[in-house]
Image (cartoon, grey):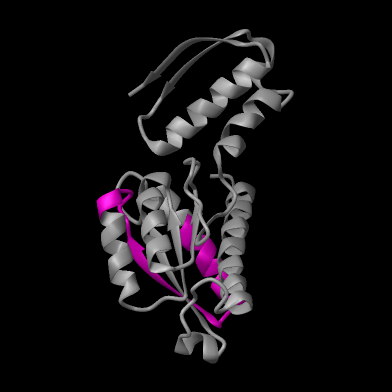
Amino acid sequence: MNVKIKKTMFIGVAGLLILAAVMVISSSGAIGYSDSQNQTNGTVKVGAIVALSGPSAIWGESLQNGMELALTEHPNITVIYEDSKGTAVDGLSAYQKLNLQEPDVFVSSLSIVSLPLASIAKKDKMVMIVTQSAADNITNEYVFRYYTDANHFATPSFESPISPLKNIKKIAVIYRNDEYAKSVANKIQELSKEQNKQMVFLESY
């Protein structure tokens, strides 16, 4: 990976971690934050549910690297990692393990993991920040999305002057059958209609 791109990605993920800390410190008690010992002594404990093994590990590793980069300048933040392996079942197990350690805020990545956790976080009144997720309807009063959604993934291909889509009239889409890809495929259909491009094929796998 290009060093400049990697550095930019890490800085963005570092911003995610700092955002989590700011939300806890500035809004403690506002919407169900626990009155933990962490908050009284000015520290923040983050429970991070990321894919550290399996096919999605490349995304989890980038997230972990970004968090570790942020920690070098924010010693009051502690992150505890649990491996979601990029699956909903393992993500739930990771959440349950972390919950026993009473984190102030959760961070979760990937749509397939974060979507089922969003309703659990709401039920438990635990703040969760999700990233690397474009799934629709993933946010609620306790769950917030950082950066990626379907619009971020699909729109540049339709608007960038160097995109090959600028000069074509027919589009075929093959997408993975999960919440992330469905959301992006729906956005592609919407943008295609707006720009009078014909969707000649749309199929999931």
Of 190 and 57, the residue lying toward us:
190
Q: In the figure, is residue 42 to the left or right of 45?
A: right
Q: In the figure, is residue 121 to the left or right of 15?
A: left
Q: Position of residue 121 (x, y in %)?
A: 40, 62
Q: Is residue 193 above or below residue 18?
A: above
Magenta residues span 63-89
Q: Residue at x 64, y 30 (%)?
A: 155
Residue 28 belongs to the span the image colors magenta? no
Of 79 and 53, the residue lying toward us:
79
What is the number of callouts on the image? 0
Q: Position of residue 98 (x, y in %)?
A: 33, 71
Q: Is residue 142 above or below residue 80?
A: above
Q: Residue at x 64, y 10 (%)?
A: 168
Q: In the figure, is residue 102 to the left or right of 157?
A: left
Residue 64 belongs to the span the image colors magenta? yes
Q: Position of residue 111 (x, y in %)?
A: 42, 45
Q: Quadrant of the C terminus?
A: top left
Q: Residue at x 56, y 24 (%)?
A: 188
Q: Position of residue 184 (x, y in %)?
A: 51, 31
Of 66 and 138, the residue lying toward us:
138
Quadrant position of residue 146 = bottom right
